[in-house]
Amino acid sequence: MADPMKIRATVEGDVTDVRVLMAHPMETGQRSQGGKKVPLHFIQNITAQLNGKTVFSADISQAISRNPVFAFKVKGAKAGDKITVIWKDNKGESRTDETTVRGGS
Amino acid sequence: MQQTRRSVIKAGGALGLLALAGTALLKPGRAHAAWNQSAFEAKSAIDAMKALGMGNAEESKDIVIRAPDIAENGAVVPIDVTSNIPGTTSISVFIEKNPFPYTGTFDFAAGSVPFVHLRAKMGETSPVRVVVAAGGKHYTTAKEVKVTIGGCGG
């Protein structure tokens, strides 16, 4: 099981800034280790939900850096709302984590 | 004659099966049906754009790409994209000189702002091309990012 994501959601006015750090090797299939090719292993799909409703999603390739970081912006969220992020990789593994929106400083 | 033809077909069939098995092994359990494999496997940005139906994107100044002019570490190149085009529904990123240029598409449902920050791997100096979908049309712009390989800087 992959390590949990780190998600931070901070609301400022009408816009909530969401930053996600995922723990994943993002192997390109081009790297060798001990004379053997390390097989492709990468996150393919990301979905982000605000209170259960999808607001942001992505299909990505192995060109995304290892331990991927993404940031995006959601409108209309309030402090205490729930942000859920789901990733799925090419080996069928997946991970779901959530956080609550925090008020800006 | 007939014999030869048969064996050729058989050989072809076996090859086809092998190829299928190979694909299945390489891509076990493709989780997401919409993940556009032909676009992700395209070896040039324009082929990937065509596979995504974005081949006819027109140049636009309303897309802002923020990325370093010179990236010392090609393994982690931060890229920010903002679209100022009204009705933007998605942002797609292509790193033209990567072995597989298509890096990803970010979809914005009602309720998110057309902005994304990502970190990508770059094999060498390359234009980073962005295509925005808005109102059924496609718009594009690009920014060159120099990659210093070897870690000693320029």
Image (cartoon, coloured by chain):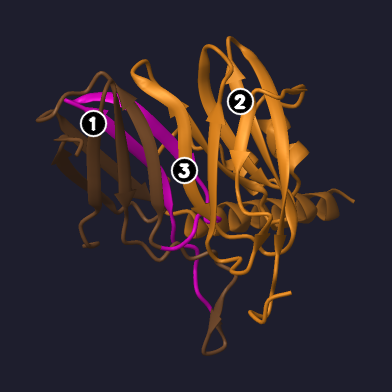
Kindly identify which numbered label has been placed on residue B117: 3
The segment highlighted magenta reads A37-66
Q: Which chain is orange?
A: B
Indicate the position of residue B91 as horizontal and vertical percent values. 55, 30
In the image, residue A16 sits, relative to residue A97, either above or below, namely above
Dot 3 or dot 2: first in sequence order is: 3
Q: How many marks?
A: 3
Q: Which residue is mark 1?
A: A11
Q: Secondary structure at mark 1?
A: strand
**Residue A39 lies in magenta, yes or no?**
yes
Q: Residue at x 61, y 38 (%)?
A: B65
Nearer to the camera, B139 or B154: B154
Which residue is denoted by mark 2 in the rendering?
B132
Chain of the residue on which disc 3 is drawn: B
Residue at the far left in the pictured view: A80
Q: Tell me the chain of label 1.
A: A
- Is there any visible trace of residue B34 in the rendered image? no
